[in-house]
Amino acid sequence: MIRSMTGFGSASGFFAGRTVTVEIKSVNGRFREVAARLPKVCACLEEAVKKLVAARLERGRVDLWVQIDDREARRSSLKVDFDLARAMAEQLNELAAGLGLAGRAGLDHLLTLGVVAPEEPSLSAEELWAALEPLVREALAALVAMREAEGRNLHQDLSRRLAALSGLSGRVRERAAGAAEALLARLRNRLAELGADLKIEPARLVQEAALLADRADITEELVRLDSHLVGFGRLIESPEPVGRRLDFLLQEMGREVNTMGSKAQDLDLTGLVLDMKAELEKLREQVQNIE
């Protein structure tokens, strides 16, 4: 079943006293383009993250964010550098005595000088990846599920428009079947309008009408169009990404319909061709959303 290129997914987890959140958003794009925004501590994992995305998504502009909330970890892992605090206190007291200033070094002075700071745990790339990979996969699964749901809606719309095009193609075929007789009748009427003195052999008249009908014949275009319609119907049932192939097929269908329009010899046929062009344009708009 076809899939849309638009979707969103997210996942959260807890690791080493930190809340890790992964969010992924995708929109339409001619090719696959992945932008990953990771915290500095996870920067070494950017390529691995992009590889996971590429394994699940064929097309679309994809934005991925990883956020780490470490406020709880910072509160529970404060580290006091006592040696630094003693040295700073002694130096501050010496400074005060040397300048003849009153007072001694207090705790508030030492805190501003950074003797108390969060203890940063040493985490390897393997440990970070073990925590991040399942969250990326979970967010990707949610995004793919949304793209598939939208794909089902697109499939219904494309199927309706495909049926409408097939119906128009049948009407064009019926209308074109009597083109030769209609051309011959118009030619006789035109000659009658030009004057009764014109003497043209009936065989020559039929021959000229046949030549005109041959130039206006759209049988080949209808055969190719019907073949493309069948192919389009098969593609939208395929489990593989088919957006590019559908787009190419629509170009071929448009070419056949345009040729029919250039050959059309009556207003009814021209009207049907215009209706076909309108349906093709609506199909083209929808196909731009398909992976």
Image: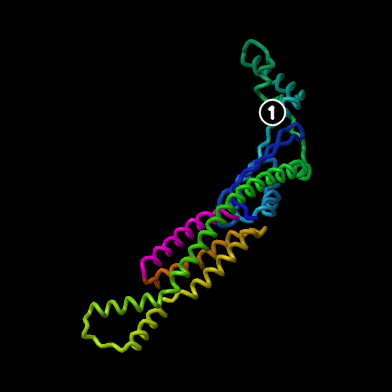
Which residue appears farthest toward the top when viewing the image? 102
Query: Which of the pair 192/1 is nearer the observer?
Result: 192
Q: Which percent across, then down, holds residue 14?
A: 75, 34
Residue 283 is a magenta residue = yes
Q: Quick check: 259 left or right of 189? A: right
Is the residue marked by circle 1 packed among few (<14), some (14-19), or many (20+) residues within 10 Å? few
Task: Find residue 96 and report its image quarter.
Answer: top right
Q: Residue at x 77, y 39 (%)?
A: 123
Q: Which percent across, then down, holds residue 72?
A: 72, 27
Task: Find residue 101 and report its image quarter.
Answer: top right
Q: Quick check: 87 left or right of 189? A: right
Q: Which residues are drawn in magenta?
A: 266-291
Q: Which percent across, then down, holds residue 53?
A: 67, 51
Q: Magenta part mainly helix, strand or loop?
A: helix
Q: Quick check: 264 left or right of 169? A: left
Above or below for 154 versus 70: below
Q: Residue at x 78, y 43 (%)?
A: 130
Query: Which of the pair 244/31 is nearer the observer?
Result: 244
Q: Residue at x 69, y 40 (%)?
A: 41
Q: Amino acid at mark 1?
A: Arg
Disc 1 designates what residue? 71
